[in-house]
Amino acid sequence: MKQIINGADLRRMIISAAAAIEINKQGLNDLNVFPVPDGDTGTNMSMTINSAAADLRKTEDPDLGQAAKVAASAMLRGARGNSGVILSLLFRGISKKLKGTEAADGVLWAEALQEGVDAAYKAVMKPAEGTILTVARLAAAKARDAAQENNHIEFVHEAAIAEAKVALANTVNQNPVLKKAGVVDAGGKGWLVALEAMLSSLQGEDVVVPEGIAGADVKEAANFDDFDTDDITFTYCTEFIIDRENDKDPEKLREFLSSLGDSLVLVDDEEIIKVHVHTNDPGKALHEAIEYGSFVTVKIENMRLQHTEKVMSEQELAPQIAEPEKPLGVVSVCAGEGLADVFLNLGVDQIISGGQTMNPSTQDILEAVNKVPAETVFVLPNNKNIIMAAEQVDALTPKNVIVIPSKTVPQGVTAMLGFNPEGSIEENTEALTEALGTVDTMQITYAARNSDFDGYDIHEGDYLALYGSQLFGTSQDIKVLLKSLAEKIRDDGKEYVTIYYGADVKEKHAQKAADMFADICPNADVNLLNGGQPVYYYLISAE
């Protein structure tokens, strides 16, 4: 039984944890009980910890404190979504405790796990039971008790895992939504997967991603210095696998995708269709593909952003921080050219492309903040799963960063209407934050899978209407949901309605939807705008 670990041990443990989460990524995504197509806990945790694995592979013979620091720093910048941020905070606390050390026994490791829990809890405003926080907290407490019994690190880590399993199983009883769905917490499961992989590495069995799974093949790096982003004709590398559920001819899908972009590879057999394509409109590709069956995996990557980050990394350039030319600036997150234009016209300085299914990392937000020529930069995440990543930026830049906790795009737009570039930091913080509560947000998307949720019998492919964060209705006819939302707006006495239609909605259909709202809500001012957002057919704000 291993007594202590050094830097080389921790390096292998974290790389193994990254591989294990990558292997289990889709399973973690599938644990998300809300059926909208943005269940990305596994994806966010995988991208976060794999940023650490990548940096650790470049680090030769680190001591324990250095290995922990490299991992924590990489995860902080690469953190995506709430689950990714919490994971990065767990490792930040571990790094803090191991700073300046060359070896850790069971007692020190237990203290490091507890330090990670403390860091994560401090960052969450209202910690809820039945989450990754619960699993990590109980596991760390058990590790502390075990260290008093036996100071071998392997013994202590095994005890932490045993308790994490019990805690994870109990999450289904602590969260009513999980209990109804009959599943455990996805983030908590991800932490258990990481702990188990770390133990496997401790025992001499490093976890390796098998060939054929994303991230498995390690190749020599190409030199992109002489390649310009203007040479990238199609921005998004889009990959997905579909479980075939009908006899539709995949050649028709091939023809459609060929018209959308290039670098198309489509492989099909009796069970699946696997697609790789470069396109400027991944939403259209996915919308067409779902006609052939349900998605097994989906990955969309911005190649322009990847290229820029690659060149910056290879040249080891210092971050470009714009000199202040004004006191205040704003960064906003959104997906869709129309929505980006709305924010830019309202005075936003930098747009980060992302949102549902494409959560930007802390590093993405940091780079946008640093480009703003202002002393203080307000950040509008416009998505509840991006807020925590945004909140990590202030510690990484000399600029003063203030996150306005907008959870939807309409909230962000309403906040910007109250922004005063000549006002003080305090006045704007108060005005933008108060504005969030003055607008109701409605969204229409589709069900990513079958679900029995909140009293609704939902079938994959059904249209879903959301009112705020709650499921409002489901139907196979989108007009039924639009009518119900319009009646809700009328009954609530709202006076201003803005409808943003998405990339997969034709203008003539959107106009009919706007006309319906105008007829049902005669006392409201109804406006229609092309948002161009993927996944969500309509975003609707009502004030």
Image: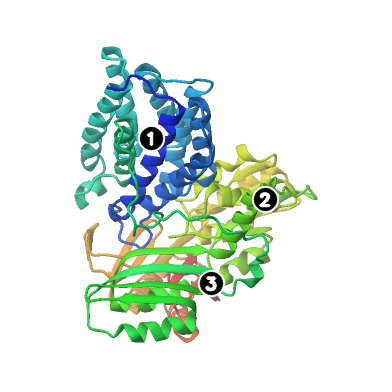
The residue type indicated by label 1 comes to Met
Determine which residue is flagged by label 1: 13
Q: CA distance from mark 3 to mark 1?
A: 44 Å
Say which label, 3 or 1, has the lower sequence index.
Answer: 1
> Quick one: SS at disc 3?
loop
Say which label, 2 or 1, has the lower sequence index.
Answer: 1
> Which residue is found at the position 49% from the left and 65% from the top?
541
Q: CA distance from mark 2 to mark 1?
A: 29 Å
Say which label, 3 or 2, has the lower sequence index.
Answer: 2
Residue 351's x, y, as percent? 62, 60
The residue type indicated by label 3 comes to Gly
On screen, residue 383 versus residue 418, left or right, reads left
Q: Is residue 236 above or below residue 291?
A: above
On screen, residue 328 versus residue 181, left or right, reads right
Q: CA distance from mark 3 to mark 2?
A: 37 Å
Which quadrant would residue 400 be assigned to in this image? top right
Q: Nearer the viewer, residue 149 or 503?
A: 149
Q: Residues within 10 Å of mark 3 (few under 14, many from 20)?
A: many
Residue 282's x, y, as percent? 46, 72
Determine which residue is flagged by label 3: 531
Q: Is residue 25 above or below residue 409?
A: above
> Which residue is found at the position 62% from the left and 63% from the top?
343
Residue 460's x, y, as percent? 26, 69
Q: Nearer the viewer, residue 244 or 399?
A: 244
Residue 349's x, y, as percent? 69, 58
Q: Are marks 2 and 1 in contact (CB under 8 Å)?
A: no
> Which residue is found at the position 65% from the left and 50% from the top?
369
Q: Residues within 10 Å of mark 1 (few under 14, many from 20)?
A: many
Residue 352 visible? no
